[in-house]
Amino acid sequence: MAKSYSILVATAFPRHATAWEKLQHVISIGGPIGFIPWVPATCASAAVAGLCWLRPPSAAVVLAVTAVLYLAGGFTATTSERVLNTQDPRNVVVDELAGQLLTFLWVAPVSPALAIGGFLLFRLFDIAKPFPANIAERLPAGWGIMTDDIVAGLFAALALWLLRAWI
């Protein structure tokens, strides 16, 4: 069954959850970003691309922060799925934060054009989900949510690197 998409996203917050589960949910939705009712995933990606343009990260920082986001996101997105009783809740954006950051692994966005290019490439690969991202999405709970965006981020990183080398 195909997912239906709209630019409007329900900004669900778990009412019947422990304080610890609510904190995990807030982490998985990227704090206030997940409360944006229109395309929070795109907003999360744009925020990361903008931050990386303002303060271009080194490859070591990209890898370290992506690893932390991946591990934290796997656990917290699993909690969000459980407490919201929804598979892959659309306001969970920790996966976009990690994947968009990984896009800038080999090319720090030192210009607005590189930041926008990295943003567009990541969103393209995140939405299209080419192999093996479409398979990674099937991993259980939060790990599938996170892993398909990591794959998309790697594809976008390679594409941005090739594009920059070509231009």
Image (cartoon, helix red, strand yellow):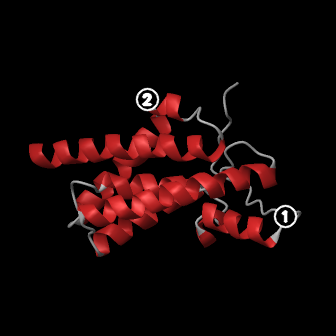
Please say if 23 is above or below 167: below
Q: Quadrant of residue 32?
A: bottom right
Q: In the structure shown, which secondary structural element does the residue marked by tag 2 occupy?
A: loop
For the residue marked with disc 1, what is the amino acid? Ala
Gap in angstroms between the C-alphas marked 2 and 1: 34 Å
**Residue at figure coordinates x 35%, y 54% from the top left:** 102
For the residue marked with disc 2, what is the amino acid? Pro
Crowd around label 1: few <14 · some 14–19 · many ≥20 (10 Å): some
**Residue at figure coordinates x 26%, y 70% from the top left:** 56
Report the side of 144 relative to 85 (left or right): left
At which x and y percent is residue 87? 72, 42
**Residue at figure coordinates x 49%, y 60% from the top left:** 69
Report the side of 117 relative to 127 (left or right): left
Q: Are marks 2 and 1 in contact (CB under 8 Å)?
A: no
Q: Is residue 105 visible?
A: yes
At which x and y percent is residue 53? 29, 69
Tell me the residue that label 1 is attached to: 17
Q: Residue furthest right?
A: 16
Quarter of the picture containing the N terminus is top right
At which x and y percent is residue 59? 25, 61
Ranked by sequence position, the earlier of labels 2 and 1 is 1
At which x and y percent is residue 123? 43, 47
Q: Which mark is residue 132?
A: 2
Q: In the structure shown, which secondary structural element does the residue marked by tag 1 occupy?
A: loop
